[in-house]
Image (cartoon, coloured by chain):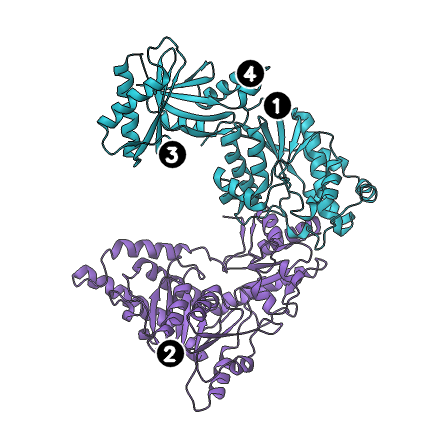
Amino acid sequence: METLYLIKPGELELKTGNRREFESRLRRDIERRLEGRARVDIRPGRFFLRVPEGLEDEAERVLSRVPGLVGYARALTCGKSMEEIGERALQIARDGRAEGHDTFKIEARRADKGFPLDSYGLARVLGRLILENVPGLAVDVRKPGFTVFVEIRERVYVHGAIRRGQKGLPAGSAGKGLLLLSGGIDSPVAGYLMAKRGLFLEAVHFNAYPYTSREAWEKVRDLARVVARYAGNMVLHTLSFTEIQTEIKRVAPEECATLFLRAAMVQAAHLLAGEIRANSLVTGESLGQVASQTAENIRFAQARTNLPVFRPLIGTDKEDTMKIAREIGTYEISILPYEDCCVLFSPEHPILRSRMDRETEAYDRIGLEPLIAEAVRTRETLAIPCED
Amino acid sequence: MSPAYLDWAATAPASPEALEAYLRAAREYPANPSSPHGDGISAHRALEDARTRLADTLGCRRGRLYFSSGGTESDSLVLLSLLRRTVPGSLVISSIEHPAVFEQAAVLERLGWRVRRVDPGPDGRVDPGKLADACSGDTVLAAVMAVNNETGAIQPLEGIRRALDEAAGNGRRVRLHTDAVQAFGKIPFQPEALGADSAALSAHKIRGPRGVGALYLRTPLESLTAGGGQEGGIRPGTENLPGILAFERAAGIATADLAGNFARARDLTDRLLACLGDIPDARPVPECRTLGDDRYSPWILSLSLPGLPGQTAVRVLSDSGFAVATGSACSSSRRKRRVLEAMGLPEELAFSAIRVSVGPTTTAAEIDAFAQTLRTAYLRYRT
């Protein structure tokens, strides 16, 4: 027997202009993640996902991760006879009781005005039925342990708790962004947050092998895999920045090494974004967190691109970022000990407030363009499919 | 395996003879040596024969040798036995001990024991007088390794024994424990001649299998673990008979021509030392190490390439087919080179150090190819 899920899409009601596009993006995303084994029906204000038996766990995982979905619930459906409706309401109530709740309420909605009982009457009848048949339950309309939802539409839908989705906007509705991904805690979280705002993601990582280890790269790949659970299929571009880092160390003033490296990364990301048609860059920067993330230094690196640079964590405390990282499952990977920048290239006293004119001149004097172009040209590309 | 394996001090690949001995023992002695039936008795006899032969190579009585799971367990048996004392005392260790001793001592420290750690000189060797000075009235144990695993520095155990005895005067004798996993089967090593009260040995450093070792004990100790009473109750648990017989076989081969092997190893490390002279700024660790220097085990040579992090060197060399070691981590903390820093080596040199260790099958051609690759890698990646 197939299982029916009722899906509440995200901010679609706000977007009357392109609502249909958003709806079909969300539908396609869910269907693609389930590899076409389940179908989504779009009804006004509601989606329904029909899932064949045995696929429920996978379907629930997808629904809990896909961007653009406020909530979902496993729903029971039936015709419009009170007997059938009552039977399903009792089933939900028994499940709620079995989960240890002792209070409930009924939330009824009559979209089909032809139905003989109004929503208040329906709630009263079903409430009494449950009280009479499920021992140990009482009604509490203010803080119920669980709620039995009943919706009278073209058919009748009965469901219990609505589980939370990721909210946000459907994947790809905002185009494609290029995520600057390191092995740290912040950038995977930034990617996740922007994916929820409707960006398809590709990621770029700047590798300094042999100054960093293969494990450091594998860590980044593993982080990309976790982000892809939410963002959908991704591509990871790995650029060798070894030459660029050694050149900066050789030529640049020591205190500017990190600043210039950041600028070179943005410059390379800008080039790459053009090739892959990304409309924006995404970074995990948080104001003042490290020396390269002061307003002055962010400005300096920012000047290497005219694409919008999305920094969803700019005003977030580290602790809160870590909390999100734990929730989405990147934290445990990010704290593995493999560094993705060799201490050799980190100045002891990095510059805090760069001066645009002076530092730009010093940066331009190094003449990194050919090395950056080469790094972009010789990049390694890895498909990161969205999977568990 | 890498075309040129130069990490013998980490694990010496098991010899065909040792592997054969392992397999044969597993087939021929399937029974538990503690069992009273015929199969058990023959297994027991094989075990005791191996003990006798291994004791002969160590120049000690067979009753003083106990089999264990390896160097770390042998060390911890000795250190943990101190916990059988009713009142915590103190112990003195060198600050360049292997983690098997160094970390185990830290555990004792958390349990109320006082631990004094004595730094070596710049040559990586512990001064006997300094060690004896660190002892006090309640010191019951001193632990100094026979050969340091990073620098190859041979520790003056005889001198340490003498200094300990002189300092103690007519008072109580301070027991001397030595982790000898880099010494036994590689350089002349006889615990009784050196005056050690206990010594930890390992099979896989001398081409035996991993997971087996032994503990020499001049007098039995009170073990912290209990069980079926095997190995005199000091290391209970069913004996790893195939491992033990393979260990004994490997030890027999290693000690049969110790002098010849030693001389060949010295030629190899001297060859590499000489090559270092052709690589600008490259230097041995410690820098005072010279050709044929008898203060160092010829099986181990550490060297430093300033400007090239040790871990980076290891990766580049590995990509070219050479396996070497480093204790360094390219991390912000920069404090993973405890041994080298204890010698007073400047951070820059410690950070850039790698360890090359050779074995009985290492060839001069491998050393030449290695030196060539090292030079290229250094010029390419030094910063």
Could you tell me residue B59's position as x and y percent?
Answer: 39, 75
Q: Are marks 2 and 1 in contact (CB under 8 Å)?
A: no
Mark 1 or 4, closer to the camera: 4
Numbered circle sitting on residue B87: 2
Q: Which chain is purple?
A: B
Display colour for chain A = cyan
Q: Nearer the viewer, residue B369 or A346?
A: A346
Question: Does the residue at mark 3 contact the one at mark 2 (Cβ under 8 Å)?
Answer: no
Where is residue A386 drawn, in percent x and y? Answer: 49, 29
Q: Please determine if labels 3 and 2 lie on a single subunit.
A: no
Q: Please, what secondary structure does the residue beneath circle 1 have?
A: loop
Residue at the outermost top position: A114
Tell me the distance, in whole angstroms, between the alpha carbons under discs 2 and 1: 72 Å
Report helix, strand or loop for mark 3: loop
**Callout 3: residue from which chain?**
A
Give residue A367's position: percent from left, percent from top. Answer: 80, 39
Above/below status of A201 relative to B371: above
Amino acid type of the residue tagged 3 in the rendering = Lys
Which residue does the numbered mark 4 point to in the structure image?
A: A19
Q: Which mark is residue A143?
A: 3
Say yes or no: labels 1 and 4 on the same chain: yes
Q: From this viewpoint, is residue B56 visible?
A: no
As drawn, the label of residue A175 is: 1
What chain letter is assigned to the residue under label 1? A
